């Protein structure tokens, strides 16, 4: 399975609505028609951008460099999940179907959480 590139960028924040208001009022971003629970997705192109609640287990520091969530697009998220799980890679959240297709997260190098989706 090959990852096809960066496809979604999100910042993990303590207060998604407050952060979204900043991006709306200060940068002029417009909200996308749909967002998953706990997140605000903006209608940015070519790569969607969002602010969202921290993933389970993330304790944001005072200056959250660790607050960046990296999403990568793959041709088949379930197949990649199965391959990573078989290789012993820690799965942070199991595959679910949502606005971005089949989606799951795993702990990558240094513990960075990387989310894979296939839509």
Image (cartoon, grey):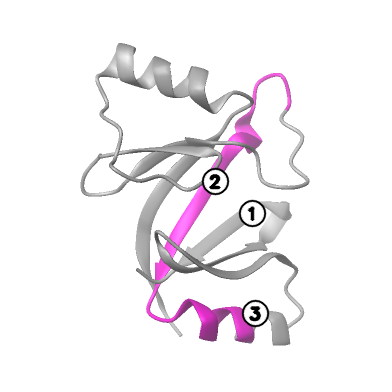
* Foreground residue among 15 and 82: 15
Q: Is residue 19 left or right of residue 34?
A: right
Residue at image location 41% in from the left, 15% down from the top: 22
Residue at image location 50% in from the left, 23% down from the top: 17
Assess disc 1: are there few (<14), some (14-19) or many (≥20) residues with their C-alpha within 10 Å of its C-alpha: many
Tell me the residue that label 2 is attached to: 69
Tell me the residue that label 1 is attached to: 113
Label 3 or label 2, whichever comes before in sequence order: 2
The image shows residue 75, relative to residue 114, as above or below, that is below
Labelled disc at residue 84: 3
* Foreground residue among 31 and 7: 31
Labels 1 & 2 near each other (Cβ < 8 A): yes
Q: Quadrant of residue 111?
A: bottom right
Residue 91: where, in percent of width, then height? Answer: 71, 68
| SS for dot 3 | helix
Label 3 or label 1, whichever comes before in sequence order: 3
The image shows residue 54, relative to residue 81, as above or below, that is above
Q: Is residue 68 left or right of residue 89?
A: left
Give the residues in magenta.
61-82
| SS for dot 1 | strand
């Amino acid at each position: 399975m090959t990852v096809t590139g960066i496809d979604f960028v999100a910042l993990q924040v303590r207060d998604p609505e407050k952060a979204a208001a900043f991006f709306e009022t200060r940068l002029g971003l417009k909200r996308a028609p749909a967002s998953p629970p706990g997140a605000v997705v903006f209608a940015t192109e070519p790569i969607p951008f969002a602010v969202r609640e921290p993933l389970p287990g993330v304790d944001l520091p005072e200056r959250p460099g660790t607050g960046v969530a990296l999403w990568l697009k793959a041709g088949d998220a379930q197949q990649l999940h199965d391959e990573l799980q078989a290789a012993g890679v820690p799965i942070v959240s199991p595959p679910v179907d949502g606005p971005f297709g089949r989606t799951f997260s795993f702990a990558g190098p240094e513990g960075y959480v990387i989310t894979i989706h296939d839509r």
